[in-house]
Amino acid sequence: MAKLDVMNLKNEVVGSIELDDSVFGAPLNRALIYDAVKAYMMNQRLGTVSTKTRGEVSGSGRKLWKQKGTGRARIASIRSPLWKGGGATHGPRPRPWETRLPKKMRRGALCSALSERLREGRITVVDAIELDSHKTKPFAATIAGLGHERKTLVVDASDNRNLQLSSRNIPAVKLATGSDLNIYDVLSHDRLIFSRSAIEALAERLGR
């Protein structure tokens, strides 16, 4: 099992934690991670974009002039796609983009991404994220003190009200819980901060 130092909010070592190799010791699987990220991003699409065909735009259906003898190009309707204000040809229509990835593949991709983040030294475990107030400035100073000045993902329990309030005004910080942690957030943030309870819950959720 991999062993990682546990810090306090003053960036002092207060203990250590052993991490399950089945979760944090998985090999890097780029193809599996790609499939998981692609599925996640497709599931974020609403699929509500739509264009009107020539049968849906407003306008008369009468023939504008006779077929022959005028010297002009033949035209059937003002709603033709060739005319300004006419219908769209082969435009996007509402459709579902949702795609399902097997549970074992989602778990394997997340474990692979977390393991790579650990090998890169991008994961910090703190004993507890207990804040005295809900103000943003002290929390921002705490994040900087832990050495996380770039995009940071903070993972803790969902009932930490002070953490929720103090982190929401910091653009580079996103808050997540162990139950809703996804592979896109893991890969799109430079640093990950876990509370001890959150990383233990995550290891239990993903472990064998």
Image: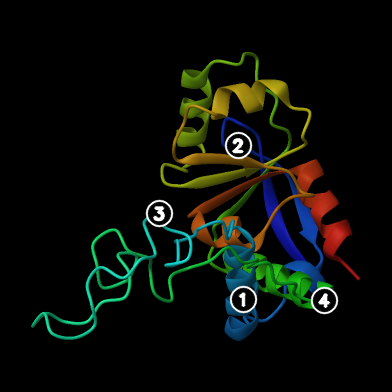
Q: Amino acid at mark 3?
A: Ser
Residue that carries the numbered disc 4 in the rendered image: 104
The disc, 3 or 1, on the residue closer to the chain's N-terminal end is 1
Cα separation between marks 3 and 4: 51 Å
Cα separation between marks 2 and 3: 69 Å
Location of residue 15 by image quarter: top right
Residue at image position (64%, 27%) is 164
Tell me where residue 144 appears, x and y as whole percent: 45, 35
Residue that carries the numbered disc 1 in the rendered image: 33
Tell me where residue 173 appears, x and y as whole percent: 51, 39
Residue 12: assigned label: 2
The disc, 4 or 1, on the residue closer to the chain's N-terminal end is 1
The disc, 2 or 1, on the residue closer to the chain's N-terminal end is 2
Indicate whether 85 appears above or below 39.
above
Q: Amino acid at mark 1?
A: Ile
Q: Amino acid at mark 2?
A: Glu
**Mark 2 touches mark 4? (CB < 8 Å):** no
Residue farthest right in this picture: 208
Location of residue 104 by image quarter: bottom right
Q: For this rendering, which residue is in front, 201 or 70?
A: 70
The disc, 3 or 4, on the residue closer to the chain's N-terminal end is 3
Tell me where residue 142 appears, x and y as whole percent: 52, 29
Q: Single out the mark in the foreground, 2 or 4.
A: 4
Residue at image position (82%, 66%) is 20
State the SS at label 4: helix
Cα separation between marks 2 and 1: 34 Å
Residue 95: assigned label: none
Q: Single out the mark in the foreground, 2 or 1.
A: 1
Is 54 placed left or right of 129 in the picture?
left
Residue that carries the numbered disc 3 in the rendered image: 58
State the SS at label 2: loop
**Mark 3 touches mark 4? (CB < 8 Å):** no
